[in-house]
Image: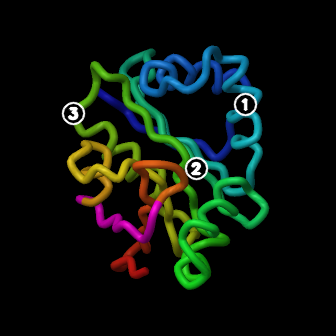
Amino acid sequence: MVQFRVEESADEEQGRWLWSVYASVFDDYANVETWYEKVWDTHRRRPGFRLACADAGDDIVGFAYGYTGRPGQWWTDNATRVLGPETASAWLGGHFEVVSVGVRPEARGRGIGRGLMQALTSELPHTKLLLMTTSDPSDPARRLYASDGWQVIGPGIGNDTVIMGKLPGGAPSA
């Protein structure tokens, strides 16, 4: 049985614990030290940081995290550039930015990603939620987000990506 929990802060030890899932899902950092230095340490200190974990007994099988997006942050500034002034003005700044969602390959297809997203985004004070994902509408993650009310609001940062948005309790608009 999988249990979901949400934490409003995280330390270095938690980052090292999450690394095993991160490394099994994403192939973008060679080791935990590099990921910790370039990503985790900065993200975990951001205002509004929130971490959802999916535990199966003593093992973590998935996680999702995000924080409050603001001008001056790499993602918000680059999303502003690619979305254009009107969409950026409507969506960016003070939004909750879903940064990373990962479920171990052997645990996929059991609703864990959906549970993580619900745990992560429920009861947030933010009026806008944003994430970036693949532009492929047949991708399982993209289908998950769409089935939960997320809509494409514009191109993503980089090739083959889109930015999706959601207004809690309402239908998104661009």
Q: Is residue 32 above or below residue 67?
A: above
Q: Can you give x and y, in whole percent of width and height, for residue 22 in the image?
A: 51, 25
> Mark 2 sits on what residue?
66
| Mark toward the viewer: 2 or 1 | 2
Q: Amino acid at mark 1?
A: Asp
> Mark 3 sits on what residue?
110
Q: Is residue 3 above or below residue 153?
A: above
Q: Which mark is residue 92?
A: none
Residue 133 relative to residue 11: left or right: left
Res. 75 image quadrant: bottom right
Colour scheme shown: rainbow
Q: Is residue 164 above or below residue 89?
A: above
Q: Earlier in the sequence, mark 1 or mark 3?
A: 1
> Mark 1 sits on what residue?
11
Most foreground residue, 113 or 158: 158
Most foreground residue, 148 or 6: 148
Q: Earlier in the sequence, mark 2 or mark 1?
A: 1
Res. 70 image quadrant: bottom right
Q: Is residue 69 visible?
A: no
SS label for mark 3: loop
What is the span of residues highlighted in magenta in the rendered image?
147-155
